[in-house]
Structure formats: C-alpha cells, structure tokens
Image (cartoon, rainbow, N blue to C red):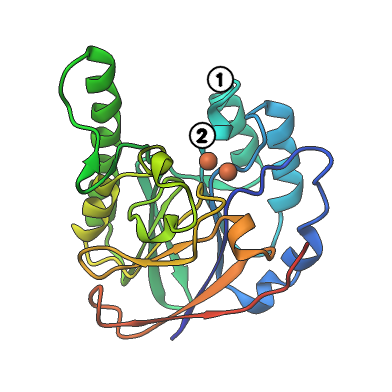
Amino acid sequence: MVIRIAAVGDVHLDQDVVGRFRPALEELPDTADVLLLAGDLTRHGTESEARCVATEFGGLGVPVVAVLGNHDYHCDEVPAVIRVLEDAGIVVLEGTNVVLDCTGVRLGIAGAKGFGGGFAGRCASEFGEPEMKDFVRTTSAISEQLGVALREMDCDVRVALTHYAPVPDTLAGEPPEIYPFLGSYLLGQAIDSAPTELALHGHAHAGSERGTTPGGVRVRNVAHPVIKQAYSVFHLHPPYAGATAGKVSAVSASGIS
Ligand SMILES: [Fe+2]
Ligand SMILES: [Fe+2]
C-alpha cells in the first residue's frame, strides 16, 4: 500500500491570496491521502488571516495536518489562529502527533514549529547571557517534544513535520549567515531518534528541495517558493520498518504561479 502525502509550506495567506491554491486543492482526493502544511500559513499571524487559511484549506476531502511558522506567531494571536484552523477541521500539531488510518496503514505524523540555532560547527550554544541560553533552550525543548512525539506513536509509517529546517542541505541557496535562523541540528537529532520515513519543512524560501539527516532520513523543503506549485506529493512505498528500508518518490502536482 503506497501512502501519498501532499505537502506545502509558506503559503502566507491573506485576503489577496485566497482562491489561488483552491483549484489544485480540489484535486487532492484523487492524488493524495493527506495534506501537510509546513507553517507560515498566514502573512502576519492574525485571526482574520487564519480565516483565509480556513477558507482555502478547509473541507478538502482529505485530512489536513499543520504546524505553525514564525509568521503565524507575529501578531501574538496564536490561540485564536489555532482555534480558527481547528474549527475548519485542520489538525494543528505543536510537539504533538496524530495517527491517521490510510486504508489499513497507520500513518503517524509528529509535528512542531521548531526554532533556530544552527548546525554542526556553526551553532549557538547554551552559554553566556540569559537571552542566549533562553534561545538555545527553546530549540532544545521543542526538539525534545518532537522526538517524544515521533517515538511514542503506535503506527506503521512515521513522518516529521516542522517549519524550521532540521538539516542544512535544504538551505542551499540561502545566505550562510542566516542558517542559524532557519533551523537547528537538534531537530535533525529528534527526527533520527525514531524510525522516521520522511521529514518535511518550510521556512527557507530561497533554499533547495532535497536533503538527508545524519541518520539517513529523507528531508524535503516544501516551502511554496521552492516547490513552485500548489503542493508536492510524496509516495511512501513499503516496507516502512525503518528510515532506510522504504522508498520515497515525488510526483508532480498541479502548479500555480
Ligand atoms: Fe515563510
Ligand atoms: Fe518562516
């Protein structure tokens, strides 16, 4: 049984964007089993923008599972944003997980926004000023929650969903100076702590699509400016037992400008 996962991030919806994705989204029940949204769903994180997200991604005929991004936090309306999305039937993960039944296969999705900090040899450490220690502790706590959420699932296939990047591979194209603000190796370690089949993220608009964690988990940057289509669809092929046992293939999907 092949699991078909559609995904996109960084749609940055506001009133003027509503409707652009919908024609391609209407085809989802024929092409995918689930749609994953990798954060930055809104432009500034207002409740009214969240209603635009609900209009665009609600009632699609497939389950929709999301994490929030940094833009969704900007106006400090996170509880209202989450409520609006959940009222539209969108599952919002933050250090939590959900297991979906895909025609007999249990698809487990663990999600967290993630945070920055950087990557091996170029990362912030929990040292010095309280503000720096808070920064790194935030990433550590979120990564720990993601790891637990991945490991505790009773499922056949594990997928990790974040906004921030777990590896530097998919940042290629971004200025190296901003890598510490685009992701953290701690997210990659969390993903590698479970037999994860696929890790999806957004946030790096100028990054690239493909990467791999040190443990061999396939990572894909699904930020809309990177994939340049309404969503990408990934096919997960059995066997699913471990990070390297299965096969991931990407198929194209309907594009929008
Ligand atoms: Fe973004
Ligand atoms: Fe972002």
Q: Which quarter holds ligand 1?
A: top right
Quarter of the figure with residue 98: bottom left
Residue at horizontal 35 percent and vertical 41 percent from the top: 95
Badge 1 crowding class, 10 Å Cα cut-off, few under 14, some 14 to 19, many 20 or more, is some
Q: Nearer the viewer, residue 227 or 217?
A: 227
Badge 2 crowding class, 10 Å Cα cut-off, few under 14, some 14 to 19, many 20 or more, is some
Residue 74: x and y in percent read 57, 25
Residue 187 sits above or below residue 124 on the image: below
| Label 2 CB less than 8 angstroms from ligand 2 | yes
C-alpha distance separating marks 1 and 2: 11 Å
Q: Is residue 211 left or right of residue 252?
A: left
Q: Is residue 180 left or right of residue 14?
A: left
| Residue at the disc numbered 1 | 76
| Residue at the disc numbered 2 | 70
Residue at horizontal 53 percent and vertical 60 percent from the top: 222
Residue at horizontal 27 percent and vertical 54 percent from the top: 188
